[in-house]
Image (cartoon, rainbow, N blue to C red):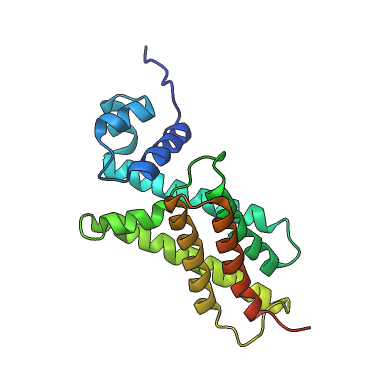
Amino acid sequence: MARHARYDRKTALERAVGLFWEKGYHGSSMKQIEQALDMRPGSIYATFGSKDGLFSEALAAYAEQGGREMASHLKGYDSIVDGLQDYLRGIACRCGDESAAPSRACMIVKTLLESSNTNSALADQANSILAAIEESIAGLVEQAKVKGELVQSVDSRRLARLLQAQIMGLRSMGERNLDPEAMQELGDDMAAILDGYRTQH
């Protein structure tokens, strides 16, 4: 009779995300993966096919989680612009909070930088995810324009790219371990950029 696995796919992916987010694709050995997932090599290959397969699923899971977190955050705001500004401030505050879990640069961007010249499939996946995020943010900008929060002349795609760069930049700055006040100021400064696109009442 087959033994019941002590893990499920979701738990294994969550652990894989943690490992890959911290160490990257090349920095994670199979031994480290086995230990992090608490799985034997045969089980890992049977479940995910390969290290590449596991990383690809972990990257997709990371992106989906990020999307859910942003959507959940924005639900708490009547104003899309206010929500986006506080989202930026929130990233900055978490990066500067020593009591919080260590902040790490965006796993998607790290993957793109690490794999651009070494693993075209993973680089393409990271690029596709970033394009989808840009699309999502552009949609939010369009909604804000319809609601009259942003001036109609705003180029939604261009502003979406700027916001995406701000998000990625804040998470990267978190790697520097700046003091909380400096990170808070940076978050405020980045959030204030959106004020220049608001409609004037």
Is residue 52 shown left or right of residue 191? left
| Residue 120 found in image quarter | bottom left
Is residue 116 shown left or right of residue 149? left
Any part of residue 82 in sight: yes
- In this view, the residue farthest toward the right is 201
Residue shown at 32%/46% (left/top)? 24
Residue 19 versus residue 198 in the image, above or below: above
| Residue 146 found in image quarter | bottom right
Any part of residue 68 in sight: no
Residue shown at 47%/52% (left/top)? 174
- In this view, the residue farthest toward the bottom is 153
Residue 195 versus residue 56 in the image, above or below: below
Is residue 96 shown left or right of residue 13? right
- In this view, the residue farthest toward the top is 1
Image coords of residue 172 (percent x, y): 43, 56
Image coords of residue 61 (percent x, y): 46, 46
In which quadrant is the C terminus drawn?
A: bottom right
Image coords of residue 95 (percent x, y): 53, 50
Residue shown at 43%/20% (left/top)? 6
How many numbered marks appear? 0
Q: Nearer the viewer, residue 121 or 102?
A: 102
In which quadrant is the N terminus drawn?
A: top left
Residue shown at 73%/56% (left/top)? 76
Image coords of residue 195 (percent x, y): 66, 76
